[in-house]
């Protein structure tokens, strides 16, 4: 028997199939066990579906999925023998499932409904979920242009059990350290970390680097340990201290494309601002000619107060250069 190379794609496939078919876990465990116990047997031909307490239907689906093989040469009219495509990769995939979100280890919370109010950004949401549930702390920095939902995402994290929100621009040293010691938060959410005052940087760095916060108490330095995960947001990463910056996983949120802007603005205007779909689309389209800042679409909608004809007037007045109505000043 030759040593097989690790196949991460196959592991991932098996892992996903177990997520989709939770009853397969037990069958796959039995298959691994049976193969472990018998592959050295003299006339080993594989296992039959009964051996592993599954059904021919499940076996056929596993074959179509490419994770189980039919051992045609070893089978006869009476008995069909099968084997796992890769016993080791199946074993690894089963172990992956055990250290998963629902298992012991990472923080426990209901991820359904998290980021519900944020449209799109699927890649960002998935990375955030992975980091939120990691067993050991992972610190995450969301950065990108304004109005790309960074604060919205962070606010949702701030509502998780054990989370504390901190606005970078208002954090004070005693405030941050005292708060950390009082609450030992599971998640520390710092929006606008690029505006954080200098005094807060050392305690934050110490927290991120070693999980320790120091406070001076009656003349001596007290040390408090905590397993806090930091989730931060910034428009300008150039203003984040390099040692702090280096301790983050960086998630870049790109500016919206024209089409993403229209879709997002339309969603925000209907769902959060109560506009009808036609009016929302009109505002989103007209504003998108001039800016990709969702907030501007919200303001235009508020001023238009439901009058479609007003939308153009407002947009033309806000961006006169582009409308061509205002003659540019001559020298
Ligand atoms: N993907 C999105 N889903 C829902 N709302 C969004 C999205 N992007 C932007 N917005 C809207 O834009 C506003 C600004 O978002 P915010 O999270 O404050 O952006 P940032 O912190 O990136 O500047 C929010 O109040 C929200 O209404
Ligand atoms: Mg923000």
Image (cartoon, grey):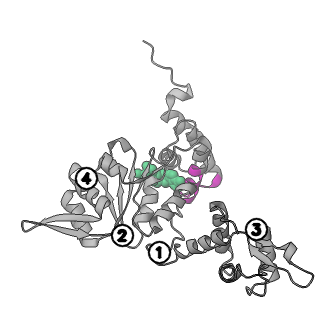
Q: Is residue 80 left or right of residue 12?
A: right
Label 1 to label 4, Cα distance in Å?
29 Å
Q: Nearer the viewer, mark 2 or mark 3?
A: 3
Disc nearer the start of the sequence (1/4): 1
Label 3 to label 1, Cα distance in Å?
32 Å
Label 4 to label 2, Cα distance in Å?
19 Å
Residue tagged 4: 201
Disc nearer the start of the sequence (4/3): 3
User: Could you tell me if residue 308 is visible in this image?
Assistant: no
Under tag 2, what secondary structure? loop
Label 2 to label 3, Cα distance in Å?
40 Å
Between residue 138 and residue 194, name the one nearer to us: 138
Disc nearer the start of the sequence (3/1): 3
Residue tagged 3: 65
Q: Which mark is residue 186?
A: 2
Residue tagged 1: 109
Disc nearer the start of the sequence (2/3): 3
For disc 2, the neighbor class at 10 Å (few under 14, some 14 to 19, many from 20) is many
Q: Is mark 3 within 8 Å of ligand 1?
A: no
């Amino acid at each position: 028997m030759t040593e097989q190379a690790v196949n991460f794609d196959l592991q991932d496939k098996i892992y996903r199939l177990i997520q989709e078919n939770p009853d397969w876990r037990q069958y796959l465990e039995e298959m691994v066990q049976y193969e472990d116990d018998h592959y050295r047997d003299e006339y080993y031909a594989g296992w039959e579906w009964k051996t592993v307490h599954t059904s021919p239907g499940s076996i056929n689906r596993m074959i179509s999925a490419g994770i189980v093989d039919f051992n045609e040469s070893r089978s006869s009219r009476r008995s069909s023998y099968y084997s796992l495509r890769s016993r080791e990769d199946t074993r690894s995939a089963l172990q992956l499932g055990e250290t998963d979100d629902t298992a012991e280890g990472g923080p426990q919370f209901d991820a359904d409904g998290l980021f519900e109010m944020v449209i799109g950004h699927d890649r960002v949401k998935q990375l955030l979920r992975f980091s939120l549930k990691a067993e050991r702390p992972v610190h995450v920095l969301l950065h990108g242009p304004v109005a790309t939902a960074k604060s919205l995402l962070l606010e949702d994290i701030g509502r998780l059990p054990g989370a504390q929100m901190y606005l970078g621009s208002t954090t004070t040293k005693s405030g941050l350290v005292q708060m950390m010691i009082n609450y030992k938060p599971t998640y520390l959410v710092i929006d606008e970390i690029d505006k954080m005052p200098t005094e807060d940087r050392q305690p934050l760095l110490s927290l991120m680097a070693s999980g320790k916060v120091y406070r001076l108490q009656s003349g001596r330095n007290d040390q408090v340990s905590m397993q806090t995960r930091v989730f931060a947001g910034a428009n300008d990463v150039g203003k984040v201290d390099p040692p702090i910056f280096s301790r983050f996983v960086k998630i870049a949120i790109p500016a919206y494309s024209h089409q993403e802007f229209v879709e997002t603005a339309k969603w925000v205007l209907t769902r959060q601002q109560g506009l009808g779909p036609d009016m929302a689309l009109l505002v989103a389209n007209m504003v998108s000619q001039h800016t990709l800042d969702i907030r501007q679409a919200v303001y235009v909608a508020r001023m238009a107060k439901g009058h479609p004809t007003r939308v153009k007037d407002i947009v033309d007045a806000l961006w006169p250069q582009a409308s061509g109505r205002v003659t540019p000043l001559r020298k």
